[in-house]
Amino acid sequence: MTARQRKLLILGVALIAFGAIKAGLIFWYLNHKPAAQAVQRLSCDPSRGSCALPGGGGLRFDSAPEHGKPFVVRLRDAAAATPPTADFTMPDMDMGFNRYTFVRDGADWKATVTLPMCVSGSRAWLVEVRHGKDAYQLPFQVVR
């Protein structure tokens, strides 16, 4: 066996070993992937007052939400190590990426949100609030 053939053999064995390690890591990851976080669906209107959250605290809109106009979402009494987030979506319609991260406002959290205009005229939205290990989904309607 020549020196060139030995180098190619070593390279081939190294590539096979690398592929086996990679396949093993992918297999391990797929079998140990964390379970999806369960979302609790609530049925209150945060624009008409504070919605009590099962994990404690409440969620409310400072004013009635409108398309294209900013409004403030407040999350009270939410003890979280990381800032909570709110994802706004429309049922059965892709409205793009509308995730907002809350910022501290005294003891509470707040986010200033601007929702895009829906060309179909739909006013139905869903907000999914995540903080810590908890996730809540609330349906609401925009004005106009």
Image (tube, rainbow, N blue to C red):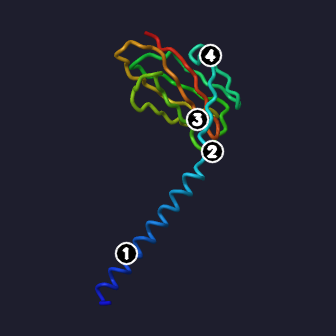
Q: Is label 4 or label 1 in front?
A: 1
Q: Is label 3 or label 1 in front?
A: 1
Marks 4/1: CA distance?
A: 67 Å
Residue carrying label 2: 81
The residue that appears at 39% across and 30% down in the rendered structure is 96
Mark 1 secondary-structure assignment: helix
Residue carrying label 1: 12
Quick one: label 1, few (<14), some, or many (20+) residues within 10 Å? few
Name the N-terminal-most of marks 3 and 1.
1
The quadrant the N terminus occupies is bottom left
Quick one: label 2, few (<14), some, or many (20+) residues within 10 Å? few
- Which residue type does callout 4 highlight? Gly
Residue carrying label 3: 130
- Which residue type does callout 1 highlight? Gly
Name the N-terminal-most of marks 4 and 1.
1
Residue in front for this viewpoint, 27 or 56: 27
Mark 2 secondary-structure assignment: loop
The residue lying furthest to the top in this view is: 144
The residue lying furthest to the bottom in this view is: 2
